[in-house]
Image (tube, grey):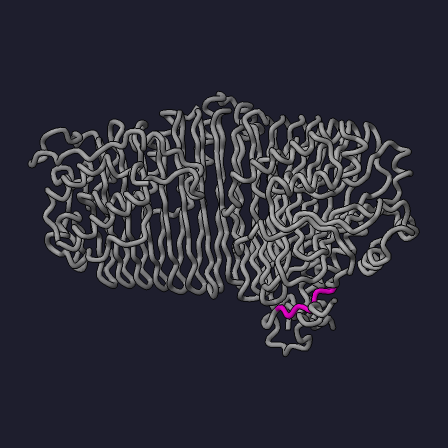
Amino acid sequence: MSDSATANRPASNAPSAGLLEGIVQAEGYKYGFITDVETEDAPPGLNEDTVRFISAKKGEPAWLLEWRLKAFRRWQTMAPPDWAKLDIAPIDYQAASYYSAPKAASGPKSLDEVDPELLKTYEKLGIPLGERAALAGVAVDAVFDSVSVATTFKDKLADLGIIFCSFGEAVREHPELVRRYLGSVVPQGDNFFAALNSAVFSDGSFVYVPAGVRCPMELSTYFRINAAKTGQFERTLLVADRGAYVSYLEGCTAPQRDENQLHAAVVELVALEDAEIKYATVQNWYPGDENGKGGIYNFVTKRGACRGARSKISWAQVETGSAITWKYPSCLLEGEGSTGAFYSVAITNNRQQADTGTKMIHIGRDTSSTVISKGISAGRGQNTYRGQVKVLSNADGARNYTQCDSLLIGKRCGAHTVPYIDVRHPGAKVEHEATTSKISEDQMFYCQQRGLTAEDALSLIVNGFCKEVLNELPMEFAVEAQKLLAVSLEGSVG
Amino acid sequence: MLMTDDSAPFRDAFDQVLATVAEPAWLTTRRRAEMDRFALLGFPTRRQEAWRFTDLEPLIAAPPLPAPPLPAAGGGDGPAPASLAPWLLPAPTHRLVLVDGRFAPALSAGGALPTGVWLAPVAETLRRRPDMLEGAFGDGEEAFAALNAALFTDGVVLALEPGVVLETPVEIIHHTMSAAHARLHIALGAGAQATVVETAMGTGGGWGNTVGVISLGAGAVLTHLHIQAEDPAACHTAAVRAALADQARYEACALITGGRLSRRDMAVTLAGDGAQFRLHGAYLLDGEQEATLSVRADHLGLGCRTEEVVKGVLAGASHGVFLGTVAVAPGADGTDARQLNRNLLLSPQARVDTKPELEILADDVKCSHGATVGSLDEASLFYLQARGIDPETARRMLVEAFAVDAIDAAGLPDALAALARRHLRRWLDGGAS
């Protein structure tokens, strides 16, 4: 079953050619394995019946089916965006299957009931579940393909009134909350991929933190894409009520796969008065092999609304995976004195392409935002920062600082910076800075002269380059992210 | 799509041009091809990335059409020579005045040219030395450039043989009352040097649509000051394409204050090794004005440098746009490129869009860009007022200091810098709130 994984592994002892040349001989994808679980899939194709099938499978109320159908009808009138600096092979949306759920008679009641194959998968990924979860202090709502399998720490969170569950469960248990906030930040027709997601989203996570509650632990969800030919359409909705605080982690790895898999997620964050949301992502989906074969298409819409005064939303992301990334986690700064932040590290190696960045829309008075983006290109990777800072005419005292730096490793990669700054208020202060440079031979020589191998030296320099962003990640993630940077750039120096 | 062919209003003018000019057959063929291209392209729309911030409605609604040629002997409705006076450089200069895109000898002032210098109107060049312009009306141009190539009636050609240094500045005045499609061709041989001042002005709601084609040989140096001071109701579109050989230097300065709608597109190709492009400039706008300065620098050679410093001052309900792209081709190692766009918003209705873009496909590069948007510094205003300066004067001083920086840093020859400063003051006296 995992033959493809070994078949695609390139010769690991490639001859080295020059210090910074001969770059990029990635080792086989370390997390590439496929779990053998029977799935109950929707037939391939996408039409209104598919949408009805998904909705029926999930036992959804009529209003949600209507909501999906409205999105689907909207999607049919839309065209995929073509403005990004991405070379995307045409996608046949009728060839994929839009629903797959691990087969189970009825939902598992405890870990014992969970398919052992699944548990093994999580083990390989090092996801703490059960006891391990308790030790790690992490509540995990692990999403395996489309249906939430096991949720821990629920009781503890429930004591505080925090709702942390799968999206499907939230629809059943808390329809009023879902109905109030679903699509309120990313409307159905927001963009092509968001519309597609709205029509066929499978599952995801739902978090509600009640007024005045500080969530005592980092919440995390692991997404995996597993069943072949199944696009994954996560839907995440996170609401922090007045004065609430929550930190949310999202990490992804996916089994190695030759066929491109589409992932079009939507994440909506809502922060009310004085609330704070921290959302961190480590994205390490299969990037395709060194020739650009295979890999995940990651077309994600993430947006947070700072609805209340003095609310805060911070996005931190480490993007090392996926063949193509199209992703712009954004903040709508509506509340007076609200704050948005975006910290990003994006690495493209081999034939990976990333077009990522953020939008900071300053709507309310005295809103402020910070954008720190670090792009690293190696191999034949193409890395684009695309960001927008918009100050509307009522945003008196708005303040933005943007810094985006690019690092180039090798002669065949590309780094691009496309910032849009649109200011309609004289009381605003907006600053943008960007630099592009390469790792100098001097830096490498200095490190190696002190006994580091070329790869360790590179890893050290790259980690230093990314430090401002890594510092923003929760501790557990920061450690993982540093390792990931090193792994992602393996083979970049000969 | 033929139903919405934007070329329709220009067909009569096009036929008229073909009927009145006597020119080589290859050029007529070229004009037809360019007219067809414009028909195909139509006016750009905001759906196109490069045009998303530019509102062409004022132009497209009723595009001004070229007026018939003025009666010979310089009479008719041409501008009075005195009206040009405030815009002129002190003598000596080689001055060529174009009225509605046609050379007006009565307003121009020549002076003896050194050997190895060709300076003449385009129409005259096409009569006497058509070979110099063969192939100069190139392919792959944008809609406005295509329309220009189809409709142009005249322009200026400046060609220097290798090693020739033209000390006296060349002064080109575009005076537009209806519509002018003028061309500017500059070709400097290896090691040649020249200074060109181009001033766009006029009366009434006209439309100046110029195309400049610049080619600099190895080690050549061109200093190019552009002052755009069109009538506040006018439209102005200009495209400049420059190609730089080894060690060539293009020193550009652009001061944009005029026009209801204006757009300047510069595309500079640093093809040779060690070529340098410097652009300093400012757009100062008020009322309902909108101006776009779009600059693309393509780095192809080794060790090339680009330096751009563009300032924006936006008063009233004006809208300033800066689109800057530095593209570094694979192998263009040693590139050093800097872009800086700073903007001052002086009123709640003013608006700025800035997009300093980098496209980098080589690794041994140093590229940076910066953009800022802000208002006048309250502390500085307070400081000046605490010293007895009234608020109005204090504001003016700060705005002037902000903008004059762009002129000073350009390192223009004294006469040109003085002209640019004079123009800046005129704007400050006229409108800065």
- The N terminus of chain A, quarter of image: bottom right
Instruction: Write down the region rendered in magenta.
Output: A24-30
Residue A133 in picture, x, y percent from top left: 88, 50
The x, y position of residue A158, in whole percent, is 88, 35
Classify residue A241 by image quadrant.
top right
* A26 with respect to B339 (left or right): right
| Residue under the image location 42 percent in, 37 percent down | B46
Q: Is residue B120 in sight in this rendering?
A: yes
Q: Is B373 placed above or below A3 here?
A: above
- Taking the spot 14% from the left edge, 29% from the top edge, the residue there is B77
Where, quadrant-wise, is the C terminus of chain A in this rendering? bottom right
Residue A25 colored in magenta in the image: yes
Please give the name of the residue rendered at 53% of the width and 44% of the height, measured from the top-left corner: A419
State yes or no: residue B295 in magenta.
no
Q: Is residue A94 above or below residue A163?
A: below
Q: From this view, report whether residue A182 is shown above or below residue B226.
A: above
Is residue B197 in view?
no
| Percent coordinates x, y for residue A269 in the rendering | 70, 36
Residue A275 falls in image quadrant: top right
Left or right: A195 in relation to B110: right
Q: Nearer the viewer, residue A212 or A295?
A: A295
Q: Nearer the viewer, residue A113 or A105?
A: A105
Residue B396 percent location from the top left of the image: 45, 27
Q: Residue at (49%, 33%) from the top-left corner?
A: B344
| Residue nearer the viewer, A371 or B79 | A371
Q: Main secondary structure of the magenta part?
A: loop
Q: Is residue A236 above or below residue B177?
A: below
